[in-house]
Image: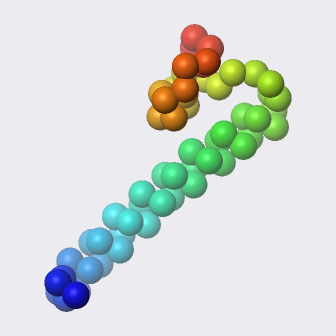
Amino acid sequence: MRWTDHKTVGLQYGLTALVFLLIGFLLMILMRWQLAWPGQPMPSWIAFFLGESNARAA
């Protein structure tokens, strides 16, 4: 293992946790959108992150 300093490992752990938290948040928003409005296109700010082209104009 290349990085053994406890400060570096702690920063990597924190940043990785933050990235996965944001991914989980985006998935949670998508699931709630689908449950609330089934069959409707996603809002443009969500579709931007996914690269979708069928988003409604917000």
Q: Residue at x 72, y 43 (%)?
A: 31
Using the rendered view, name the quadrant where residue 14 is placed: bottom left
Coordinates of residue 17 in the picture (x, y in percent): 43, 66
Coordinates of residue 57 in the picture (x, y in percent): 57, 11
Q: Residue at x 75, y 21 (%)?
A: 40
Coordinates of residue 28 in the picture (x, y in percent): 66, 48
Using the rendered view, name the quadrant where residue 42 is placed: top right
Q: Nearer the viewer, residue 52 or 20?
A: 52
Image: 56 above or below 20? above
Quick check: 15 left or right of 43? left
- Its colouring scheme is rainbow
Q: Residue at x 62, y 47 (%)?
A: 27
Quick check: 41 left or right of 39? left
Image: 37 above or below 12? above
Coordinates of residue 32 in the picture (x, y in percent): 74, 41
Q: Quadrant of the N terminus?
A: bottom left
Q: Quadrant of the C terminus?
A: top right
Q: Residue at x 34, y 64 (%)?
A: 15
Using the rendered view, name the quadrant where residue 56 is placed: top right
Counting the numbered discs, the total is: 0
